[in-house]
Image (cartoon, rainbow, N blue to C red):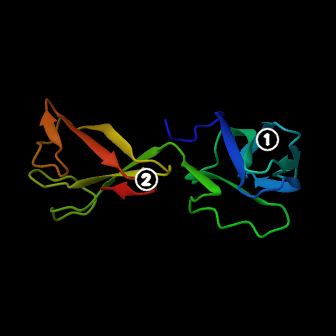
Amino acid sequence: TGQAEPGEQLTYTITLTNTGGSDAVNYAVSDRLDPNTAFVSADNGGVHAAGVVSWTVTVPANGSVTLTVVVAVADPLPAGVTQVANVAYETGTTPPPCPPAGGQCVVIPTEGAVVIAKALAGESGSAAGVAEPGEQLPYTTTLTNTGGSDVVGYAVSDRLDPNTAFISATHGGVHSAGVVTWTVTVPANGSIT
């Protein structure tokens, strides 16, 4: 679904097109793999070494050759990895920047991963650290997305202590029967409070 998921196999295709009138003989191509992937296979004699797949092929005059490489996404993905990138280039030349995505570079975001943190944001009473009768206790709930894709429709609930009374909630929080619920979008590599 457009996301690099842990353990998933990704198949990349590289199309070499020769618009000239002569065959391009012994044309060398390299494909640098993302460090968060593992080589699985390559067609047309592709050879893998040190994170790079290399081919030497003949591209026919006014024709094309398609090369395929398959990789597996690391499982688990290390914390903080927000994308998996792959770049192909003519061997012996400087690889183009990757990211950003472009004609020779494919960038796939990783799945969203939400972490929840709740904290007391302040006190209105006279004794710090003591819940006093009638005192308002504002809490913040922070949702942090450490992944590379937005998490849409994320539902979170906060059960209130039975010795408290609900006053308000931000971001459309709805209170019912002692529980505040939200359904929100947590942005890729971002947070909401």
3 displayed left or right of 98: left
What residue occupies the far front of the structure in this picture? 21
Q: Label 1 belongs to which residue?
A: 39
Amino acid type at circle 1 is Phe
Q: Is residue 105 left or right of residue 130?
A: right
Q: Position of residue 193 (x, y in %)?
A: 30, 56
Label 2: state its secondary structure.
Answer: loop
Residue 38 falls in image quadrant: top right
- In the rendered image, residue 60, in percent from the top left (x then y), is placed at 80, 47
Residue 133 vs 76, above or below: the answer is below
| SS at mark 1 in the image | strand
Name the residue carrying label 2. Answer: 188
Image point (62%, 37%), residue name:
6
Q: Residue furthest bottom?
A: 94
Front one among 3 and 74 = 3
Total of numbered circles in the picture?
2
Say whether disc 2 or disc 1 marks the residue closer to the N-terminus.
1
Q: Return the residue nearer the eye: 41 or 170.
A: 41
Q: CA distance from mark 2 to mark 1?
A: 27 Å
Is residue 160 visible to us here?
no
Residue 65 appears anywhere in the view? yes
The type of residue carrying mark 2 is Ala
Residue 40 lies, with reference to residue 92, above or below; the image says: above
Q: Residue at x 64, y 48 (%)?
A: 78
Q: Residues within 10 Å of mark 2 (few under 14, many from 20)?
A: many
Image x and y of residue 77, in percent: 64, 44
Which of these two is toward me, 27 or 7?
Answer: 27
Viewer-nearest of labels 2 and 1?
A: 1
